[in-house]
Image: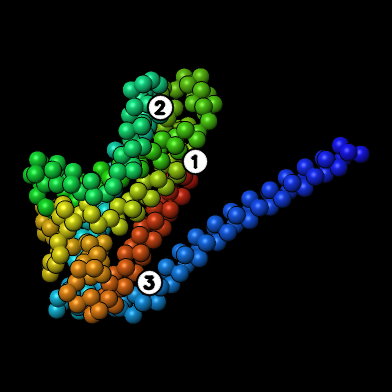
Amino acid sequence: MKSSVKKSHKNLKSQLTQFTGFLFLRLAVYSVLFILLYFFYDVGSQGYKAISWEFLSQVPKRGMTEGGIFPAIVGTFLVTLITALFAVPLGMAAAIYLNEYARAGRLTRLIRLSIRNLAGVPSIVYGLFGVILFVNMLKFGTSVLSAGLTLGLLTLPWTITASEEALKSVPDSYREGALALGATKWQMIRTNVLPYSIPGMLTGAVLGLARAAGETAPIMFTGAAFYLPFLPRSLKDQFMALPYHLYIMATQHHAIDKARPLAYGTALVLIVFVVLFNLGAILVRARLRRKWRH
């Protein structure tokens, strides 16, 4: 009798603990969603008033209190494109080498630890490093190229880490089966590993690029300009960018009250840019998954 009562109390305590844990998790999720929705509502309700064809297709005018943000849109797109071309192939290749080719040992562990630490370095440090390496040493100057490569360095640790975790999720039996049938190392990776890991690798790369598209500190040192009424003619020119443009209009503008509606509009365009970028990457990921698996 006592043992049954004790068992009943134990089950009740376990159920109470489980209920409390699930309640806490639900509250955490709902809190995040509430904050996110409120943020989108605030930016959207204020920003849509500034959206017009002139706003999207014209250059800033009258001290950036009128006109549009077209040069900033083009500059953000160019910098993100350079970042993707630099960071995604290099990061994925590094992850494949570390997970599939590198021997387990102290050096490999040290490399992985360094990559994890680099992912947590503040972005302003990358900006200063970009000034030293790309602007001064390699003589690229303050330009689209310098800013894109700096953001590529910032994104690289994220891409490597996410890609390596995606590769680790593929069961070893897939590798062993291919090798047992006489496939080479690269054939095994290409046919039995990448088709199942490429969605996760692309997800990590996209998250890193989305972060890079919204960064201000690295580009303000390496190429972003306060105001340019024209588009960059080459990769060696300075450029305007949405994050830096938004930072100036929201905090440094001489007439913040007049510029605030345009700042909200710029913020909304930047959010839409990142969302569309992510949606495009999701479509590419789904297409690649179907192609690799067939």
Residue 190's x, y, as percent? 41, 32
Label placed on residue 294: 1
Disc 1 vs disc 3: which is toward the camera?
Answer: 3
Sequence-wise first label, 2 or 1: 2
Pick whichever of labels 3 and 2 is earlier in the sequence. Answer: 3
Image coordinates for residue 42, horizontal then vertical, percent? 40, 73
Badge 1 crowding class, 10 Å Cα cut-off, few under 14, some 14 to 19, many 20 or more, is: few
The mark tally for this picture is: 3
Which residue is identified by label 2? 100
Q: Which residue is at the front of the view, 55 or 157? A: 157
x%, y% of residue 280?
Answer: 39, 56
| Residue under pointer 3 | 43
Q: CA distance from mark 2 to mark 1?
A: 23 Å
What is the three-letter code of the residue carrying label 2?
Answer: Glu
Within 10 angstroms of label 3, few (less than 14), some, or many (20 or more) residues? some
Q: Are marks 1 and 3 in contact (CB under 8 Å)?
A: no
